[in-house]
Structure formats: structure tokens, C-alpha cells
Image (spheres, coloured by chain):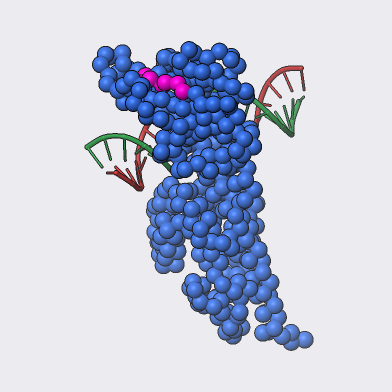
Chain colours: A blue, B red, C green
Amino acid sequence: MSKCGRKKYIKTNLRQMTMETVESQQDGSVTDSVAESKSAHMQTQTGQSSVPTLAQVSVAGAGTGRGSPAVTLVQLPSGQTVRVQGVIQTPQPSVIQSPQIQTVQVATIAETDESAESEGVIDSHKRREILSRRPSYRKILNELSSDVPGVPKIEEEKSEEERTPPNIATMAVPTSIYQTSTGQYIAIAQGGAIQISNPGSDGVQGLQALTMTDSGAPPPGATIVQYAAQSADGTQQFFVPGSQVLVQDEETELAPSHMAAATGDMPTYQIRAPATALPQGVVMAASPGSLHSPQQLAEEATRKRELRLMKNREAAKECRRRKKEYVKCLESRVAVLEVQNKKLIEELETLKDICSPKTD
DNA sequence: GTTCTTTCACGTCATAGTGT
DNA sequence: ACACTATGACGTGAAAGAAC
């Protein structure tokens, strides 16, 4: 398999897995579209052999799941109807709480029940298109964290993934978070406070505060950044004029004349004119000042582009993190459903034994 | 040891969705 | 209408393991 093909295979599997889980959580059944699109890989993973067994017994009141006691009428092959108190006492809250997906579920199930055989191909295609619409991991996870206390959450990954954000989370609602190429996080809060956190360091230790002080003294287009290092003796000020950039200086202790040298373990920063290819560890400085020459305009465009790329970079990272979390949720959901399925089958077998005693 | 395969993470682009 | 964000798609490179 070529590299590209493999990637598509993986992506397809991921999407199909999402679809399967979404569709199967409604009533435990698997729709035809899922069955036809299921890859061999997923078939081996999710032992579906139990589903047909359930399908042989007609279960009335499947819709009683939402908000009503889990008493189910089970019609046995012999014709008897038995009230069954299910293993699942209350409707299990779905791991996936997105209203968007819920809507899709309803449509899918309705189609499956009524006219799946006639419009199968077209509908499954449509369905796939709908289902493949972008899920909002943010919404899903927000709802997960607030609405569903009983749902197994992925704490391990959170603790692992949020090892860097916690340093930032202690701040007052940052509006922008940047990560330098050296791994440091620089957050700009709404109040103008800048905080630098070292992901490698533990908690507050790696946190440094930079406070914006609009003292009026700086020239137009410049911003005074007050360096309030925690371990430093005093505060230091340096200007970040309009089209200049603040560059983290990893090794040298030399600092420009307009910037006091950092003390102790604190990193030093240099202010440079933006090159065509920006150096590592660059933090864009605000430059709302007036632009005149085409060169300045070009610089501004470059700066904006770099800023946009940097933001998008961070957004992509965050998105991937959420996606991983989301997939983990789905996987745990699958595990839960499989266990429930097993229990239900066992329960059914027990009931069968009770209701149809052996004749010999 | 070298080559191939697989997996993972990343950066970038395009674009739908959302807020102002 | 515009700016911004979130996410899918794509290409790339590194790391790990398998096959030779």
C-alpha cells in the first residue's frame, strides 16, 4: 500500500469508526450502511457476531430508553411476551452528546426502519456525506466534561496533554497563546499581561510574568513590556517597536542596549528587524502604527502571515489533541456497549431458559 | 546493517462555521 | 462583510519495528 493510500485507509477507518459508534448507540443495532462500509479491520475488532442473535427476538418498546424505566417487552420465539427489567437500569448517557450528531442519528434510524431497502445506495451515500460532516470536538468535549458525570473520561490523556496548558490556565483568560520553537508558551491576557511558561518546568516555577505598561513614554507604535521575572531582583523594561520582533536568545547572555540582560535562568530576548524568514522563537509585536512604503506594507503582510500561520499551528495542535480525546471517548463507548451487549445476551439466554423449560 | 513498512506528529492550506 | 477559528486534507519527516 502506498503511503498516500495508507493514510486514506486510516482516515477512512477513523471516520467509519465514528459513524459506526454513532449509529449503533441508538438502539444497539447496526445499520446496513455501516455493515456495508465496515472495513475488515473493524470487523475483527468489534466482534459483531452477537448482533444477529439479538435481532432474532423482537423487542418492543425500544424507544422507552429515553427517560423511562428500562422495562422491556421481549417477544420470545414461542410467541410469549415477557416483561424484562433490563441490565441497563437507566438509559446510558451517550458519550457523544453533540446535537448535530443526534439529529443525524434520528434521520439515519428512521431511514433504516422504513425505506432503507429501496433507497439504499443513494441514501447510504447521502448519509455518509452527512455523517462525515465535521464533528465539533470542542462542543462534544465541552458537553462531555459538563453534562455526563458518569461517562468514563480520559483523564490520563488530559493530564498528559494539558501538561503545558496548566501553566497558562492559572492566568486571567489569555487571548493569545504562542509557543516558541523552544517549547515555551507565551500568553497574552486580555488585560495586557504577558506570561511565559516553560513546559519543561513544573507549574509556577516556569512561569514568568510580563506586564504591559502603557506609560506613554514610548514612541508611537511601541509598547513597553515590563519584565517581571519572578526570580529576578527587579523589573526590566524594553521596547518592542512596531515592525520589530522579540526574539528569544537561547544561549548568549548579551542583550541589546535597549534591553537589560536577563538574570539567572531567565531567557534573554533580542529585538530584531523581521527577516524574510523569521528566526526561531519569534513573538510578533503589535504594530498598529502607520505604514507608508511598499516595503513596510510587505513587511506587514509577512508579519500578518507569520502570525496567522503561528495561530493556525497552535489551533491544529489543539484540534489534534481534541480529536484524539474524542476518539478515545468513542473507543471507551464501544467498550461499554460491548459489555452491555454481552450482558443483554446473557440475560436473554437466561430468560429463554426460564420461559421455555426443557420438555425432556 | 540496510531497506521497507507502519505509526505518529507536525505544518500548511482550504474552507465551513461563527462572532462582530 | 469581514475577521477569526476549527477542522479536514495533504505532504513530510522521524522513530520504531519487521524483513532481508
Q: Residue furthest bottom?
A: A359
Check residue A61 for magenta coloring.
no
Compare residues A112 and A230 and report the one nearer the observer. A230
Residue A9 in picture, x, y percent from top left:
55, 40
Q: Quadrant of residue A277?
A: top left
- The x and y percentages for residue A1 are 59, 33
Read off the magenta span. Answer: A237-243
Left or right placement of residue A137 versus residue C1 in this view: right
Position of residue A82 relative to residue A162, above or below, is below
Q: Residue at x 54, y 26 (%)?
A: A234
> Which quarter of the rendering shows the C terminus of chain A?
bottom right
A330 or A117, nearer to the observer: A330
Q: Is residue A271 above or below residue A47?
A: above
Q: Residue A222 location, x and y as percent?
A: 36, 22
Q: Residue A13, can we see it?
A: no
In this rendering, would A220 be left or right of A6? left
Residue at the location (42% across, 16% down)?
A274
* Foreground residue among A57 and C7: C7
Counting the numbered discs, the total is 0
- What residue is drawn where x is 51% and y is 58%? A146
Is residue A242 in the magenta section?
yes
Residue A66 placement (x, y as % from top left): 49, 71
